[in-house]
């Protein structure tokens, strides 16, 4: 199994502002300006939290955004407004460990999902795009326990105003 975080942050390391708003991201560029399509072709499973799902659900095409993957949302809700997203409420580490080893899993969005996976050394790759924006405060990407985790820089890409750093464990 390959577990990968793929997402965009500000220069100062935030996924969203303090109100969970990501307008800064949409004002900077679009996914057409990145390597998103190539990345998504390799994904079998997406995993996100409820706040990320709420952001995704704002798009007019939310029901077809991740058409070829199984899409899981960590939430206390029993049902979600969009059919191809499956609500799940359990330990994220155990959930991820139960998938077949040949599955490619994309961790979308926030640190509440990413943190326990980093703490348990389950993240094999991180593709982090950095937008030329400073927020000063907000929702940080990294909130894991204090411990040394090393990744190796594989590649750097530039997409319009974004720089993309690709790291592997």
Image: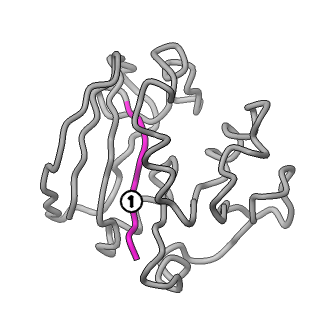
Q: Is residue 134 above or below residue 66?
A: above
Task: Please report the residue visible at 28 percent of the width from the left and 35 percent of the height from the top.
Answer: 164
The quadrant holding residue 165 is: top left
Question: Which of these two is toward me, 118 or 36?
Answer: 36
Magenta part of the chain: 1-9
The quadrant holding residue 9 is: top left
Residue for badge 1: 4
Which image quadrant: the N terminus? bottom left
Label 1 residue SS: strand
How packed is label 1: few (under 14 Cα within 10 Å), some, or many (20 or more)? many
Structure colour scheme = one colour
Query: Is 26 on the left-hand or right-hand side of 76?
Result: left
Count of marks overlaid on the render: 1
Task: Please report the residue visible at 39 percent of the width from the left and 40 percent of the height from the top.
Answer: 140
Image location of residue 134, percent across then percent down: 34, 18
Q: Which residue is at the far top?
A: 27
Image location of residue 6, percent across then percent down: 41, 48
Task: Please report the residue visible at 44 percent of the width from the left and 45 percent of the height from the top.
Answer: 38
Task: Please report the residue visible at 33 percent of the width from the left and 24 percent of the height from the top.
Answer: 159
Q: Does the magenta stretch include residue 5?
A: yes
Image location of residue 87, percent across then percent down: 75, 65
Which image quadrant: the C terminus? bottom left
Question: Which of these two is toward me, 65 or 15?
Answer: 65
Look at the magenta stretch and give its main secondary structure: strand
Q: Is residue 29 above or below residue 51?
A: above
Question: Which of these two is toward me, 166 or 8?
Answer: 166
Query: Is 124 on the left-hand or right-hand side of 141?
Result: left
Q: Does the magenta stretch include residue 142?
A: no
């Amino acid at each position: 199994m390959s577990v990968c975080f793929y997402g965009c942050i500000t220069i100062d390391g935030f996924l969203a502002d303090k109100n969970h708003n990501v307008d800064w991201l949409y004002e900077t560029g679009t996914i057409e300006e990145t390597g998103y399509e190539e990345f998504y072709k390799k994904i079998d499973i997406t995993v996100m939290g409820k706040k990320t799902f709420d952001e995704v659900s704002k798009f007019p095409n939310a029901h077809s955004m991740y058409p070829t993957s199984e899409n899981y949302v960590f939430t206390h809700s029993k049902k979600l407004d969009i059919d191809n997203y499956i609500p799940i409420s359990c330990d994220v580490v155990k959930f991820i460990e139960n998938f077949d080893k040949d599955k490619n899993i994309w961790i979308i969005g926030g640190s509440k999902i990413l943190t326990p996976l980093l703490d348990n050394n389950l993240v094999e790759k991180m593709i982090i795009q950095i937008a030329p924006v400073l927020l000063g405060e907000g929702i940080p990407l990294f909130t894991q326990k204090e411990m040394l985790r090393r990744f190796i820089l594989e590649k750097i890409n530039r997409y319009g105003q974004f720089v993309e750093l690709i790291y592997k464990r």
